[in-house]
Amino acid sequence: MKTRIFVIVCLLCVMGSPLFASAEAELPTMQSGTYEPYMSFFAGVAMPFSRDATFQDGTTPTVVENVDYQMKHSWGGSAGIWFPTRDKLAGFDLGMELTGYVWYPDVACCRDFFNNDPATNQGTTTEIGGIYVGPNFLVRYPMEISESYPNGRWHPYIGGGVGAHQMAMKPGGARGQSIFGAITDQRDTTIGFQAVGGIKAHLFKYVAAFVEAKYLYAHHNGLSSDRTGASAGGNIFFDPNSLVVNPYSSTVDTVLVHAGLSMHFSWEPPDWGKE
């Protein structure tokens, strides 16, 4: 856990510094007091925690401790809007967005009793694809506001939300499996909880760069793995019955670090009080 926090802090510092330096060259001139819709795209890494797997089919041992979900790449996008509420909220703006991303917490071959039989040393990689989609409710603090940059030159922000998280399990992905003999998806969807924090700085009038860290938590009851590597000897593409899966439940949580670009737009709200 300490290592993950250290990595996140270093990434925020290293990636955030050039963003602020780049913003010196050209300051946006977006109008003050407008709604601010935006679209963003990002990529980065996911650093999952090691959690226990509890198997539900009577195979033993029932619990495999500290399954090592691997750190791998992640990518996604979001669309949202900021509201000009800083005058009423001690300088803060409120916003909301819909975000979605994918990540890949595979379990490498060969973890005994999870995807390997220690008696025969026959195992398979358990390939996993995670997808999260959900809303975030956000708070930001615009900094260095001026006439030439009324919406803030840069913005630290935090937020959180609740969405849907799906895990697609792919047992039988290694140990003699060809590209045609691999993988039948086993999917499970549940509620996911997310917290997010980051820093955004404008590079041009309507283009900003950002780096952010997310924490995702979900508990799944319908995951699966080939505990003994029994799928390795069959051709799953031509014979789906040769796929062997053992269902299990597990907490799935991870820290994700994303960096990306966003496009912002200036939208004048209607003046309802004007006759």
Image: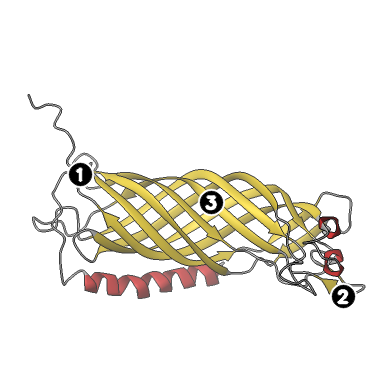
Q: Is residue 230 above or below residue 93?
A: below
In this view, the mark in front (2 or 1): 1
Disc with the residue nearer the chain's start (2 vs 1)? 2
Viewer-side residue, 52 vs 123: 123
Disc with the residue nearer the chain's start (3 vs 2)? 2
Res. 121 mark: 2
Residue 228 visible (yes or no):
no
Disc with the residue nearer the chain's start (1 vs 3)? 3
| Secondary structure at numbered mark 2 | loop
Residue 204 screen position, x and y as percent? 20, 64
Task: Tell me the colour scheme of the image.
Answer: secondary structure
Q: Which residue is mark 3?
A: 132
Residue 143 screen position, x and y as percent? 21, 58
| Secondary structure at numbered mark 1 | loop
Residue 11 screen position, x and y as percent? 41, 72
Near mark 1 (Cα within 10 A), the count class, few <14, some 14-19 or many ≥20, is few
Q: Quadrant of residue 155?
A: bottom left
Q: Which residue is mark 1?
A: 267
Q: Count the labels in the image.
A: 3
Amino acid carrying mark 3 in the image = Tyr
**The C terminus lies in which quarter of the figure?**
top left
Q: With 135 as the anchor, is 1 left or right in this view?
A: right
Amino acid carrying mark 1 in the image = Trp
Res. 257 mark: none
Viewer-side residue, 224 vs 49: 224
Identified at 62% across, 59% down, the residue is: 129
Residue 34 visible (yes or no):
yes
Amino acid carrying mark 2 in the image = Asn
